[in-house]
Image: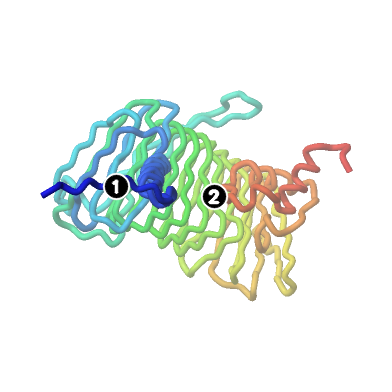
């Protein structure tokens, strides 16, 4: 029997079909690399820790030049990404005891009073206790992250976190979409950005700027030295904000019935509301300015030196008191109005420099920011 010899195939070959698997494999590889790079560019070390409900996360970074980003996800774990591996400790702590009470001890903060660049006095913000909200007594998983100066960290935490505490020397801190029960931010200098938070919070800063955008706060306590504070589109039930010389701006916001008090020794305070409120402004050595576009806002000046404005027929009482600065009361947001009066320049400058600008706004500046540019550049149209 003679073995049959296979004939060579000389017909056409579908070259595209033969190459397709290689294209698919190459494309998937590129996609995976791109996703890995987008997750945390430049951060090589990653660690993850499983935690239970209402976990406590503490991030502590000393020194200058730090970068911290905190995000949330619907997973019961804490992920830490960094350039250089930080020290991470996970343990169980029982809260509601004499050693670990259901309140955070806030340390005192020294400050200096300055006039014309010269120190004319010194003081100390006293220590405080800030009770935890909706935080059960008993054992909790605690994850503590400690890094050296110049650290770059991305920390992702569960949405059910009971307490998030950051203690940062200086640099940039960004906390995005935090929905945990309690938030504590202690930072010496730099910039803190808080966006989309729904929580109870305490913030203490020495120098720099705090920006809070689209937040809902059941209780919020802020105290700063020279740091400037800008709230945008926030809703607060109980808020108390104090500064030594830093300016405080609450723009395009609203208030639920509860304590609402803004106070500064020498900084300006500006309140812009979008819902009914009873605003009361007073300054010892400065002035109280009002500007309401909505008709029917009743403005009065009682004999005690307070200027009141009943916006929308009145609502929750909101007090703004400055010793040596000015107080500004208005409706709406500075992003949608044109302000040309020279006495409003400090407010416009504060808003344009320290607010958190959304990506969609970078291409087209709002009216108030364009007006600020015109004011700062005299001689132009």
Query: Which residue shows up at 10% across the image and 49% down it?
Result: 1
Residue 172 visible: yes
How many numbered markers are drawn?
Answer: 2
Looking at the image, the residue that sits furthest to the top is 118
Q: Quadrant of the C terminus?
A: top right
Q: Nearer the viewer, residue 146 or 118?
A: 146
Residue 126 visible: no
Label annotation for residue 7 = 1
Mark 1, residues whose alpha carbon is within 10 Å: few (<14), some, or many (≥20)? few
Q: What percent of the width, then of the height, locates residue 43? A: 36, 34
Provide the secondary structure element on which disc 2 rests: strand
3 displayed left or right of 364: left
Residue 22 lies, with reference to residue 276, above or below; the image says above
What is the distance, in whole Å, between disc 2 and disc 1 at their CAs?
94 Å
274 displayed left or right of 259: right
Query: Which residue shows up at 56% across the image and 42% down it?
Result: 228
Q: What percent of the width, then of the height, locates residue 198? A: 41, 60
Q: Nearer the viewer, residue 330 or 259?
A: 330
Q: What percent of the width, then of the height, locates residue 223? A: 46, 44
Looking at the image, the residue that sits furthest to the front is 1
Looking at the image, the residue that sits furthest to the left is 1
Query: Which residue shows up at 18% across the image and 41% down it?
Result: 90
323 displayed left or right of 190: right
Provide the secondary structure element on which disc 1 rests: loop
* Residue 380 sits in quarter: top right
Q: Which residue is mark 2?
A: 263
* Residue 162 sits in quarter: bottom left
Q: Nearer the viewer, mark 2 or mark 1?
A: 1
Earlier along the polypeptide chain: callout 2 or callout 1?
1
275 displayed left or right of 124: right
Q: What percent of the width, then of the height, locates residue 12? A: 43, 51
């Amino acid at each position: 029997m003679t073995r049959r010899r296979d004939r060579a195939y000389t017909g056409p070959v579908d070259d595209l079909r033969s190459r397709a698997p290689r294209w698919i494999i190459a494309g998937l590889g590129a996609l995976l690399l791109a996703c890995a790079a987008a997750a945390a560019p430049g951060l090589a070390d990653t660690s993850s820790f499983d935690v239970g409900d209402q976990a406590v996360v503490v991030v502590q970074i000393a020194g200058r030049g730090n970068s911290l980003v905190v995000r949330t996800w619907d997973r019961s774990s804490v992920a830490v990404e960094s350039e250089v591996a930080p020290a991470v400790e996970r343990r169980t702590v029982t809260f509601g005891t004499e050693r670990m009470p259901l309140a955070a001890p806030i340390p005192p903060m020294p400050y200096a009073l300055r006039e014309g660049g010269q120190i004319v006095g010194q003081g100390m913000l006293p220590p405080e206790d800030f009770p935890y909200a909706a935080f059960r007594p008993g054992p909790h998983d605690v994850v503590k992250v400690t890094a050296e100066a110049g650290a770059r960290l991305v920390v992702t935490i569960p949405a059910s976190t009971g307490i998030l505490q950051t203690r940062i020397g200086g640099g940039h801190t960004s906390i995005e979409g935090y929905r945990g029960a309690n938030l504590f931010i202690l930072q010496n200098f730099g910039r803190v950005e808080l966006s989309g938070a729904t929580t109870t919070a305490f913030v203490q800063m020495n120098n720099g700027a705090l920006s809070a955008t689209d937040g809902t706060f059941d209780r919020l306590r802020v105290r700063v030295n020279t740091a400037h504070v800008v709230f945008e589109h926030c809703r607060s039930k109980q808020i108390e904000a104090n500064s030594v010389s830093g300016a405080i701006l609450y723009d395009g916001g609203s208030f639920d019935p509860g304590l609402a008090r803004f106070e500064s020794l020498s900084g300006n305070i500006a309140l812009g509301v979008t819902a009914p409120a009873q605003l009361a402004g007073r300054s010892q050595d400065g002035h109280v300015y009002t500007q309401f576009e909505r008709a029917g806002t009743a403005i009065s000046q009682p004999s005690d030196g307070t200027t009141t404005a009943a916006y929308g027929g009145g609502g929750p009482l909101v007090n703004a008191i400055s010793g040596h600065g000015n107080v500004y009361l208005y409706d709406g947001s500075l992003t949608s109005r044109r302000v040309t009066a020279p006495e409003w320049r400090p407010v416009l400058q504060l808003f344009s420099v320290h607010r958190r600008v959304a990506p969609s706004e970078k291409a087209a500046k709002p009216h108030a920011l364009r007006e600020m540019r015109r004011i700062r550049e005299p001689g132009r149209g």
